[in-house]
Amino acid sequence: MSQPSKQPIVLMYHGIVSEWTALPKTREVGADLYDVPTVHFMEQMEWLKANQYRVKIFEDGMPAPGEHEVVLTFDDGEMNNYDQALPVLKKCGFPAYFFAIAKRVGERGYMGWDELRAMHKAGMAIGSHGFSHEILTNLLDSQVEEELRASKRYLERNLNIPIDAFSVPRGFCNNRIIRMAYDAGYKQVFITDHPRALRIECLSRIAVKPNWSLERFELALIGEVPIMEQIKSWSIRIAKRVFGSNIYDWIRKMLLKI
């Protein structure tokens, strides 16, 4: 499979938060960099609806892009997705993907089985975000297999639904990881930024940031990125290649703690 020249616009969210949101204590350092305020999320969804965007999930396999189509995804499975994001999505009539970390289902601050079942009943797609949120490129093949297959089985067994979509944790992936995900039975694989060397078909995503204005959100929907963000993204990709995933992740965590 080769990477298509064009794909649907796929937006990536994590936490949807308000000032009273209780956040999980087990979230990784830097997770707050992706916490979108509920009021901004509401404005963004209302903009999509007002501008007649079709928000979709995929029935099978990889989709062909369409005009005025967008896919919404949420990583980590935090409880705020149920409390804050779901009511807005239901009001707008939008489906979305919610990727749960299997090991954290039911932990404090994360959705439990009842919430995930309610999500599915409301028309949302539930996917896997790995079993323990490990950086997969650091693992042996046998360990990657366990992260992929054990999380799929665990979610399917407890929810009694097929788990067809996988979101690669922490933004580190390569051809080996994507190929193994398809071999594990997933039909769609979502990543973050698309590595230049990646040749296998998958869905890259645009990370929605807390400080985005509605104008910046609109740019994302037409695939435009401000020059300073392009430079930052390029610098991060270079740093990942130079240092490798372990050292890059360690440096990032140390800097965020300062």
Image: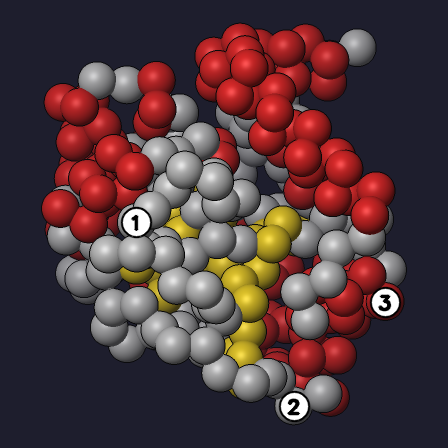
- Percent across and percent down for residue 68 are 59, 84
Judge depth for marks 2 and 1 and give the one in front: 1
Q: Amino acid at mark 3?
A: Glu
- In 3D space, how far apart are the residues under numbered discs 1 and 3 (Cα atoms)? 33 Å
Q: Is residue 158 above or below residue 232?
A: below
Mark 2 nearby-residue class (10 Å; few <14, some 14–19, many ≥20)? few
Is 26 placed left or right of 36 in the picture? left
Q: Is residue 123 visible?
A: no
Judge depth for marks 1 and 3 and give the one in front: 1
Q: Nearer the viewer, residue 220 or 4?
A: 4
Q: Nearer the viewer, residue 148 or 94?
A: 148
The residue pinned by badge 3 equals: 215
| Label whose residue precedes the other's in the sequence (3 or 2) | 2
Mark linked to residue 126: none
Q: Nearer the viewer, residue 22 or 218?
A: 218
Q: How many marks?
A: 3
The residue pinned by badge 2 equals: 52
The residue pinned by badge 1 equals: 200
